[in-house]
Amino acid sequence: DTGVSQDPRHKITKRGQNVTFRCDPISEHNRLYWYRQTLGQGPEFLTYFQNEAQLEKSRLLSDRFSAERPKGSFSTLEIQRTEQGDSAMYLCASRPHVSAEAFFGQGTRLTVV
Amino acid sequence: GESVGLHLPTLSVQEGDNSIINCAYSNSASDYFIWYKQESGKGPQFIIDIRSNMDKRQGQRVTVLLNKTVKHLSLQIAATQPGDSAVYFCAENRYGGATNKLIFGTGTLLAVQP
């Protein structure tokens, strides 16, 4: 396993379209996180999974956002009816337990035009 | 959001000098801290971590200092090299009910001049 993998790396979409991103964590990691990062800022927490259970969602995650981790392995993040303000880097991270480093993927860069 | 900071502080150093990057954290209950390095267009990369029962930890060319009294972290990079140029973030491990997450501070842009 070479690390956390995210797909696609880049996505350009028109406003109002739906987009879906995928994250494949490190295989033995049961904890998975999604973050959003805009230019000049640190990553902002969006949501957290422990195995298949989504245990926390940030208030940043509006009704247009949904995340799943159906089998406790890969995860998807869907944004419906995209808006220009959704343009950002979406980062996925995984970790084996609570007091360990989180390993980040390379991110998906979303541009909404 | 839970990441604070709209302006990116910049530290400019000469190649070969030592660099010190500072970070303030907010939650006195946080028990674990990590420094990450992020290069343009890439995800954050782990540098070094420290637990709250320690005040200093050393790695290869890097040292992290933790001052719990004033809730302050610092990252020291010895003999800074051009490849160290990147944005550096500190993160604190925060617990809430059944969950835990890393909360990132304001990044610092390190620019190494040859």
Image: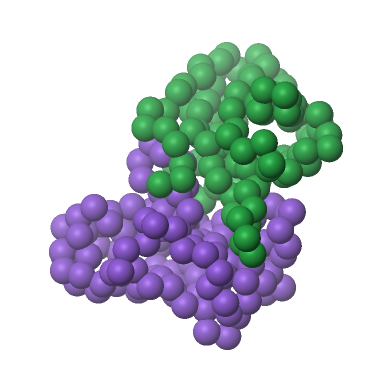
User: Residue A14 or A100: which is nearer the viewer?
Assistant: A100
| Residue B112 vertical placement versus A21 (above, below) | above
| Residue A97 vertical placement versus A72 (above, below) | above
Q: The C terminus of chain A appears in which quarter of the rendering? A: bottom left
Q: Seen in the image, is A41 located left or right of residue A80?
A: right
> For the image shown, how many numbered marks are present on the structure?
0
User: Which residue occupies 81% across, 29% down?
Assistant: B56
**Hue of chain A?**
purple
Q: Position of residue A110 (x, y in %)?
A: 31, 59
As drawn, which residue projects farthest toward the front?
B97
| Residue A108 vertical placement versus A49 (above, below) | above
User: Which residue occupies 66% across, 28% down?
Assistant: B71
Colour convention of the picture: by chain
Task: Place residue B67 in its image quadrant.
Answer: top right
As drawn, which residue projects farthest toward the bottom?
A71
Can residue A29 be seen? Answer: yes
Q: Position of residue B39 (x, y in %)?
A: 50, 41
User: Residue B86 or B6: which is nearer the viewer?
Assistant: B6
Task: Place residue B65 in its image quadrant.
Answer: top right
Q: The N terminus of chain A appears in which quarter of the rendering? A: bottom right
User: Residue A111 or B71: which is nearer the viewer?
Assistant: B71
Q: Seen in the image, is B46 located left or right of residue B9?
A: right
Task: Place residue A87 in its image quadrant.
Answer: bottom left
User: Which residue occupies 72% across, 44% down?
Assistant: B32
Can residue B74 be seen? Answer: no
Q: Position of residue A18 (x, y in %)?
A: 25, 73
**Hue of chain B?**
green
Q: Seen in the image, is A12 located left or right of residue B3?
A: left
Q: Position of residue B68 (x, y in %)?
A: 73, 28
User: Which residue occupies 36% across, 45% down?
Assistant: A38
